[in-house]
Image: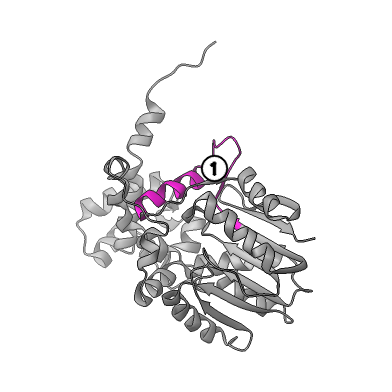
Amino acid sequence: MNKRVDTTRLQEMARAYTASAVLYTALDVGLFTHVSNGYNTETALVEETGLRPVDVDRLVSCALSLELLDWEGDHLVNTLDVEAYLVEGKARYAGAWMMFTRPDVGGWFGMTEKMRIPDSTKLGMYQELTVESARKYHRATASIGFGAARRFVKTVDLSTRRHLLDLGGGSGAYSITAVEHFKGLRATVLDLPPVVIATQEYIADAGVQDRVETLGADFTVGEFPSPVDVVVMASNLPIYDSEIIGGVVSRAFRALEPGGEMHLIGEMLNDNRKGPVDAAMWGMNELICGSEGRAHTRAECQKYFASAGFVDIEVIDFVPEILARCVGRKP
């Protein structure tokens, strides 16, 4: 019997923005932090937030329906991921990153105009970064970056490596975490000049100034410092088009010592381009950001490595359905 076709999925997609809006509002009023701190009834939330009872009722109903809150007896509790990542003051708090992306909402609903009257440059908004905007960006994203870096050092053995080149390293999360984990390693973070000023602050906070240095430059042009024996480019893949990524991988190959390795970590599409959705959306985000970047498939990333001369190339799930890691070795 043929499956009945209706509009349910399409209607849910058309109104998906409502879930985002509820999440932003819950973060605005500190809903999850209040619940975690014991204000776990609607009466207590009304008193703590100053909102009308009807609006607390509406917000709690939405949060329960979206599985952001749950019941424990007659008290509200945060679901596990909310308690871990959306309670202010906790080490892994990710709400700052989510709120940082909130101003992008208008751009997403203006995509049609951006496509019809394109106005993009190689780096888009990124070429206009200032020291303060870099600081703001990394205040919002550092917890996520350091979390990914901890995953990296747990899955990749760099114990025999001496010098890591961190391309577009931003906060320096990968470099800082790597030198802390592998005592014989030092690192260079290469990023735009305004960005590395912010990077230096993270390096100083970690107390690793003697092992992590910075280089202010646009890594999409020019040769890289060498020799190095490991290159990492993480979480900025969709910002760039194929020509730029291919060039970066080739120049990384030239900078590496024989036997050295490169790790390209980012949102990669499956080869049929039918997902992950997150990778496709990050590619589309570059329309909003005004760059010429796009989503790249796993096969394309492998091709960039092969064309540069790498061997033993493979693509491995890094964070399933979110990030993949393409790795290759210089013969």
Query: Per the image, is 286 magenta?
Result: yes
Q: Quadrant of residue 208?
A: bottom right
Q: Quadrant of residue 32?
A: bottom left
| Relative height, residue 236 to residue 149 (above, below) | above
Q: Quadrant of the N terminus?
A: top right
- Label 1 secondary element: loop
* 36 vs 108, nearest the viewer: 108
Q: Is residue 36 left or right of residue 164?
A: left
Q: Quadrant of the C terminus?
A: bottom right
Residue shown at 30%/58% (left/top)? Answer: 103
Q: Residues within 10 Å of mark 1 (few under 14, many from 20)?
A: some
Coloration mode: one colour
Query: Per the image, is 266 magenta?
Result: yes
Farthest residue, direction left: 52
Pinpoint residue 136: horizontal percent, then vertical percent: 37, 72
The residue under label 1 is which amino acid type? Pro
* 300 vs 323, nearest the viewer: 300
Q: Is residue 167 left or right of residue 196?
A: right
Residue 33 visible in rendering: no
Q: Which residues are magenta?
A: 265-289
Residue shown at 69%/76% (left/top)? Answer: 163
| Relative height, residue 283 to residue 5 (above, below) | below
Pinpoint residue 241: horizontal percent, then vertical percent: 50, 51
Pinpoint residue 252: horizontal percent, then vertical percent: 64, 64
Check disc 1 and report the residue beneath it.
276
Q: Is residue 325 left or right of residue 236?
A: right
